[in-house]
Image (cartoon, rainbow, N blue to C red):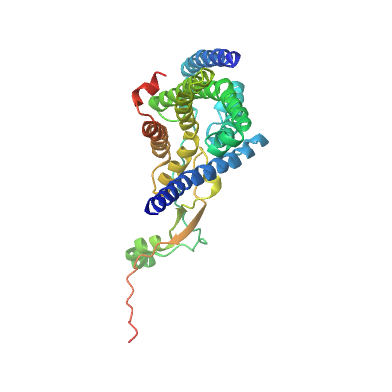
Amino acid sequence: MKAIIYAGIGLFAAASVYGVVDYYNTKSKGTLDKMYKEEEPLVTVKKETAPAPLPTTTEIKATTLNTTTDAVKKESKKVKVRRIKFDDFSRGRIMPEMTIEKEIKADSTVTTKGNR
Amino acid sequence: MHNSRQLTLQSSIHYFFTALFWIPVVFFSLLLVKNTLPYFTFSQGFIFIEERALLFLKPIYKFSFYSHILAGMFCIIAALTQFSSYILKKRKAVHIWMGKIYVTVVIVVGAPTGLYMSFFAKGSFWERVLFMFMAMYWFYSTVKGLQAIKGKNILAHKNWMIRSYSMAMTAVTFRIYHILFYYFGVGHLHNYEISLWISVLGNMLIAEYFIFRKSRSYLKTFTT
């Protein structure tokens, strides 16, 4: 068992010396801060629609007021859903299992009648 | 009659809490082993490896990583048998051989490779220091545990091995915290750092609590 302890001490010392040397080499090359991938930003995707014919000036005037709300209506958002799997039991980054599309409605106020 | 009933109740409570502690420990340890096995296909398609793609270009890092996870698997499996009083009493040879595997693997493979990889660990400077501390403490506590049993000091052996196992188990507890914080919406890097600190310090505190509970002169456990 003494041999194991001595071997361990030797390996431990070698690992620390090599680690320091390798660390400073990497630092001097300037790659130390780029070792890990950057986090990807949350993606917002617009629904693709068929290209419409160019409107006339009068049509533009008429539709100006509704442009904002229509744009919001057409926009859809990818939402990351947090679901835990057994595979996520790791040191790696946990990726959202799936993305779902949610349509954002401009006017979501709905009047409902109660059942009486 | 009253006394025997009280004893039965006490032992039932004891078994209940023992099971409450060990069932999750065994389950998550086996889950860790199960999730580690696919890495030995040497595929580069794992998120953990993709994140460290540049590091994996270094042959020594790659070698350290695979040695470290192999060592970790052996440690986790070997350590599971070491705290069973049944194995210790009825199958002492199993305890001795598993202990030898654990000690050899930690001292020769797990701790040195862990120390090398700690220089390039994810997070800030302090996370790297924490990983270095973990490797050193894991190595030191295992060596002390081995020396204690060679000197027939069973109590000191138990105490140092609890400390050593607490460091081995940071791999398991880190993953539990990591998932919990992810579930509560903590960002990836913060989650990684918080989980790391809580797992290391938390495991050390739990280990010291177990030792404190059993040792009459607690402070002496560090010098024996």
Where, quadrant-wise, is the C terminus of chain B in this rendering?
A: top left
Residue drawn at the location 41% of the way across and 26% of the way down: B130
Spot occupied by residue A71 in the image (x, y as percentages of width and height): 40, 60
Residue A9 vs B4, above or below: the answer is: above
Q: Nearer the viewer, residue B189 or A78?
A: B189
Q: Quadrant of residue B196?
A: top left
Q: Position of residue B21 (x, y in %)?
A: 46, 44
Q: Nearer the viewer, residue A2 or B85?
A: B85
Looking at the picture, how far across and down is residue B53, in whole percent? 56, 31
Looking at the image, residue B190 sits to the left or right of residue B87; the answer is: left
User: Residue B95 is drawn in which quadrant?
Assistant: top right
B193, above or below B131, in the image: below
Q: Residue at x 49, y 38 (%)?
A: B172
In the rendered image, the quadrant that contains the N terminus of chain B is bottom left
The residue furthest right is B41
The correct choice, above or below, for A9 with respect to A54 in the image is: above
Can see residue B119? Answer: no
Residue B110: percent from the left, percent from the top?
Answer: 55, 25
User: In percent of the image, x 55 and y 37: which residue is there?
Assistant: B80
User: In this orientation, which residue lies closer to the viewer: A58 or A100?
Assistant: A100
Q: Residue at x 54, y 45 (%)?
A: B27
